[in-house]
Image (cartoon, rainbow, N blue to C red):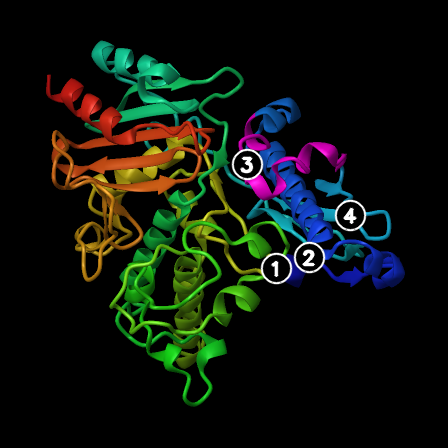
Amino acid sequence: MLKKLASIYILGALFSHSAFAQEDETTRYDRALAAGYKAQFICSGLWNGGKSLADIKADELTGIYDRIANIVPTLAEEIDESERQVRVRFADDAPPRVAIWNRKSGCTSMPIGFGGLKIGAPVIERHFVDDQPWPMGDQNAVAPSPKLKNIAERAFQPDIYGGKTSALLVIKDGKIQTEKYKQGHDLHTAQRTWSVAKSLAGTLIGHSVQQKMVDLNAPVQIPEWQKFGDPRALLTIDNLMRMSSGLVSDTAGNRTDPLYMGGASVTERATAWPLLYAPGSRYRYANNDTLLAVHAARAQHRDRKQKQGNDLPEQHDFDPYAFFQKLGMTRTYVETDWQDNYILSSQVWTTARDLGRLGQLYLNNGIWDGERLLPENWREYVSTPSGPQPEGRNFGYGATFWLMNQSEGIPKDTFAGFGNRGQYLVIIPSLDLVIVRRGYDTGDNSFDIETFTKDVVGGVKG
């Protein structure tokens, strides 16, 4: 969106090649990544999350990647409230790293070397429906359960389940039975979902399948892979959603530094990796698979609309903002790179209640306010393992959702979205139950979601 609404210019003259040659390249790049990270999180935390700068620095900018952890505090931020921009300088001879906010998709991290905007980007107005009844709005949402309230209180005691809990929400039979937030947070405070975004990506793809705009089992139509002889063109969206693409990447897991911190684009990074294994033969958790699944889904959308003469209505576009508005998830921001690609592997900001609404959609088996938004079998599809599975873990993997079907004391139909720093959305259809836990955990102090889920299940059954 930003690319279409605003023109940019690059101030290459600000780079001094002689100074650059004298400086260690890795150190300079790490400083650029740290500046981009800080600009992005301050921007998103302020205007997506509604957080104070002090809370952002205490929560979002601590416990972060070792690569940049010691650099981030040394860099000064410049916050432009009128333009909704954050700028962080990393070198005297280079432009600052810039993150720019808009109301539809939140903050966009601009590439290293970006000089500024010539024309401000017009923005839409978000429509909030807080005064409507739950689950669309926030009224009449709570039916308190004293027993679950006690369990929720324990989630905020790090010596019991570990971690640093910021929000806890339990929905049973369509009502919030317990809800609690850390000081400085409330029901409208948004946090980054990290990899719970992958489950949101899977939901959006499911909506596209319901609209008959996407075929999960057809060869992907990723434009960058359409040259003759490219074996990656045979991959399917199903392969990508199940983390079984067979593609190699620089690191497994959730490290996509050039994209998340460096202002690179999805198309230039995620599409570049070659096949190493036959598609569907090996499980490898990777951000790239989710990024590519969304990229492929959008390509299928465009292709089908062109074949039908672009006569399909706007609701048949791949539009996260419009979809989440339907669910009352009005404080959910799906961020993009500067070339308008959705970063649905991690870069979504949302509230605990909005995640609860998403869980409720799955409890309703894809129906919301009388309208079918997901295929009738979608819940079964995302929560069913197929092909290779994670090794050495107590959790399986479906399609963009983790499976908690191997844990004693937890119903076998339990599936979940898991995210870095302790973001959890747990869905248990057989109990009509949704658990949302948000946090600011660190690698050496994580939240025990398995034990906590067992305790909630026990509280509900008891």
Question: Quadrant of the image for the C terminus?
Answer: top left
- Residue marked by disc 2: 111
The span picked out in magenta is 59-80
Q: The disc labelled 1 sits on which kind of residue?
A: Ala
Q: Considering only order in the chain, which callout, 3 or 2, is on the residue closer to the N terminus? A: 3
Q: Residues within 10 Å of mark 4 (few under 14, many from 20)?
A: many
Q: CA gap, disc 2 to disc 4?
A: 10 Å
- Residue marked by disc 3: 64
Pick the front one: 199 or 174 = 199
Q: Considering only order in the chain, which callout, 3 or 4, is on the residue closer to the N terminus? A: 3
Pick the front one: 135 or 70 = 70
Q: Residues within 10 Å of mark 3 (few under 14, many from 20)?
A: some
Q: The disc labelled 3 sits on which kind of residue?
A: Ile
Q: Residues within 10 Å of mark 1 (few under 14, many from 20)?
A: many
Q: Along the horizontal axis of the image, is 189 left or right of 449?
A: right
Residue 344 is situated, as x and y percent measured from the top left of the image, at: 45, 52
Residue 264 has which mark?
A: 1
Q: The disc labelled 2 sits on which kind of residue?
A: Pro
Q: Is residue 160 above or below residue 280?
A: above
